[in-house]
Structure formats: C-alpha cells, structure tokens
Image (cartoon, rainbow, N blue to C red):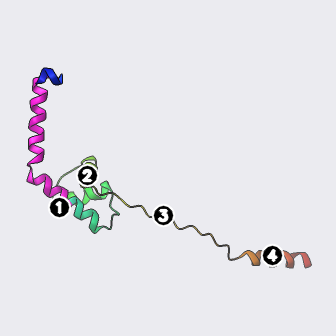
Amino acid sequence: MCRVLGVNRSGYYSFQKRQANKLGDPLHEEILECVKNIVIDSDYTYDCRRVRKSMNALSYPIGRRKAATLMKKAKVEVRHKRKFKVTTNSNHKLQQFLVKTLVTY
C-alpha cells in the first residue's frame, strides 16, 4: 500500500493514528460545540482572538490559530457590520444663505 501511495511506512501509520484519534475523540467534539456556542452567543461578533480568550477562561488552553481552525470546522465566522454612510446633505440651503448674506454686506 505504501509503494502505491508513494509514502513512507512510518508516515502512513502515523497518519492513520492521527485520524483515528481525531474522529473518535469526544473532547474534540465538545470543544467544537463550545466554540460554536461562544460565537452564536456573541451574535457572531467574536473572532478567533476573543474565542481563544473565552476558551482559556473555560479551562480549554488553546492558541489563536487553533481557535481559528476550530471556528472553520464548526462552520462559524464573524459577521462584520457595515459602517453607516451619510448620504443626505441637510445643510445645502444654509450654505447658499451664507453666500448671499456675505455678498450683500
């Protein structure tokens, strides 16, 4: 099998071991649910840095990049709000009034 795939025997078996640990690990599923709940409770405003702080407060020591990968696996992401842009110029008549008063003096 290793010759067909073109990999080392040790690499193939370590890959199998990592996949077996990842799939059946109940702690991993618990952490994913916790990350999902944190982001949903924050109304999708927490990014990976704030998720990391929340997870560390809950005694799950993870780093920022691990928090980002957990967010990707949980399929949650930050929803950025658009900035408010003013499109109405309510003082346009005021400028004309000032120009007329300055010209008359």
Residue 20 is situated, as x and y percent measured from the top left of the image, at 8, 42
- Quadrant assignment for the C terminus: bottom right
Of marks 3 and 2, which one's residue comes earlier in the chain?
Answer: 2
The disc labelled 1 sits on which kind of residue? Leu
Residue 82 tag number: 3
Q: Secondary structure at mark 3?
A: loop
What residue is at 30 percent from the left and 54 percent from the top? 48
Say if 6 sits above or below 64 in the image.
Answer: above
Of marks 1 and 4, which one's residue comes earlier in the chain?
Answer: 1
Which label lies toward us, 3 or 2? Answer: 3
Q: CA distance from mark 1 to mark 2?
A: 13 Å
The disc labelled 2 sits on which kind of residue? Ala
Residue 67 tag number: 2
Residue 10 is situated, as x and y percent measured from the top left of the image, at 10, 26
Which label lies toward us, 1 or 4? Answer: 4
Region in magenta:
8-34
Residue 96 tag number: 4
Q: Are marks 3 and 2 in contact (CB under 8 Å)?
A: no
